[in-house]
Image (cartoon, grey):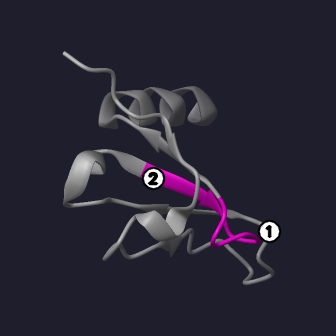
Amino acid sequence: MSALPRNVPSSTELHGVRWLRSSYSTGANNCVETALPHSGPWSGLLAVRDSKDTAGPALLFSPESWAGFLAVVRS
């Protein structure tokens, strides 16, 4: 079994995704955006990118890893 990818060099490689940001964002481009790729090798992973660099890299997380991250942040 091959390891899951951890990032993509450019978030533009994630074709057909809809990037979302928190409703708490002020629109000043100082936050992160998330997307759920539905096809390709990234299907089922959560992508996260910097809103200031929309063509820059994106980190990829499994649903379990992201849920664990959120649980720690919320506690």
In the rendering, at what x and y percent does residue 35 appear?
41, 63
Q: Quadrant of the C terminus?
A: top right
Residue at horizontal 63%, vertical 71%? 55
- What number is the disc on residue 47? 2
Residue at horizontal 76%, vertical 76%? 29
What's the distance in space between the residues labelled 2 and 1, CA to CA?
Answer: 17 Å
In the rendering, at what x and y percent does residue 44 appear?
23, 46
Is residue 13 shown above or below 67?
below
Q: Earlier in the sequence, mark 2 or mark 1?
A: 1
Image quadrant assignment for residue 54: bottom right
- What number is the disc on residue 30? 1
Please indicate, yes or no, whether residue 44 appears anywhere in the rendered image.
no
Left or right placement of residue 29 versus residue 67 in this view = right
Asked if the residue under mark 1 is in contact with the one under mark 2, i.e. CB atoms within 8 Å, the reply is no
Is residue 21 shown above or below 68?
below
Left or right placement of residue 18 versus residue 1 in this view = right
- Please tell me which residue lies in front, 55 or 69: 55
Image quadrant assignment for residue 36: bottom left
Left or right placement of residue 52 versus residue 65 in this view = right
> How many tags in the picture?
2
| Residue 18 belongs to the span the image colors magenta | no
| Stretch of the chain drawn in magenta | 47-56
Residue at horizontal 64%, vertical 71%? 24
Of helix, strand and loop, which mostly describes the magenta segment?
Answer: loop
- What number is the disc on residue 41? none
Farthest residue, direction top:
1
Crowding around mark 1 (Cα neighbors within 10 Å: few <14, some 14 to 19, many 20+) is few
Image quadrant assignment for residue 40: bottom left
Helix, strand or loop for disc 2: strand
